[in-house]
Amino acid sequence: MGDYFAKAAATWDENPVRATMSQAFYERVLAELPDIAGKTVLEFGCGTGSLGLRLGLDHGARMIFLDASPAMFAVLRQRISESGIRDARTFLGDLSALPKPTPAVDAIVSGMAMHHVADVPGVFRGFRRLLPPGGRIVLSDLVTEDGSFHGDAPAEHNGFDPDALAADLTASGFDAAAPRVFHVLRRSVAGGERDFPIFLLAGRAI
């Protein structure tokens, strides 16, 4: 389907609705990972890196950025260069793009990326292989909706049933906390304004 994000990448972080949601997730990540300084963190579906750059620059995380969009990746690389962040590693593609042997990872974060993944359980199993016992995962995504969120744009899933996604995470080798809605995103869709709940799912590798 090409690069769905190509046209939006350059101005992605300028959208105030998206910025508010990103800030809410950033705050939840810090609450879930209070000891992030010095830890290696993989941001899966990092986009332009707005979350991971803050975790690295402001909180001392050693970041690994992974995204499948060449356009988002180009913006990310430029932002890394301009930021002066040290030790950041970037990989274009899915989990298979990570080098072998795979780097040691202490935590994985992912904001609003899983609904673009066809095989979510497979990715969860890949996450588990990357993490040692006790390693943490923190992700956010849409509660199941009717397809209005993306309209005609491609997405693999119209959000998720949070409890079902938590069950998939548990089946992949994680002790998953009960998911909870932490933000409501209001955006214009066909027919007017709509509210879209965003949930948080966190777990620990066992």
Image (tube, grey):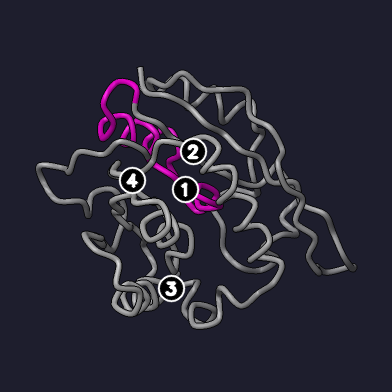
Asked which secondary structure carries label 2, the reply is strand
Q: Earlier in the sequence, mark 2 or mark 3?
A: 3
- Mark 1 highlights which residue? 110
| Segment tinted magenta in the rendering | 108-134
Question: In the rendering, at what x and y percent does residue 168 appear?
Answer: 50, 26
Q: Which amino acid, mark 2?
A: Val
Q: Which mark is residue 3?
A: 3
- Mark 4 highlights which residue? 41
Q: Are marks 1 and 4 in contact (CB under 8 Å)?
A: no
The residue under the point 71% across, 59% down is 149
Q: Is residue 202 above or below residue 98?
A: above
In the rendered image, the quadrant that contains the N terminus is bottom left
Q: Which amino acid, mark 3?
A: Asp
Question: In the rendering, at what x and y percent does residue 15 appear?
Answer: 65, 74
Q: State the CA–CA distance, disc 1 to disc 4.
A: 10 Å
Q: Earlier in the sequence, mark 1 or mark 2?
A: 1
Viewer-nearest of discs 3 and 4: 4
Left or right, 170 with reference to 146: left
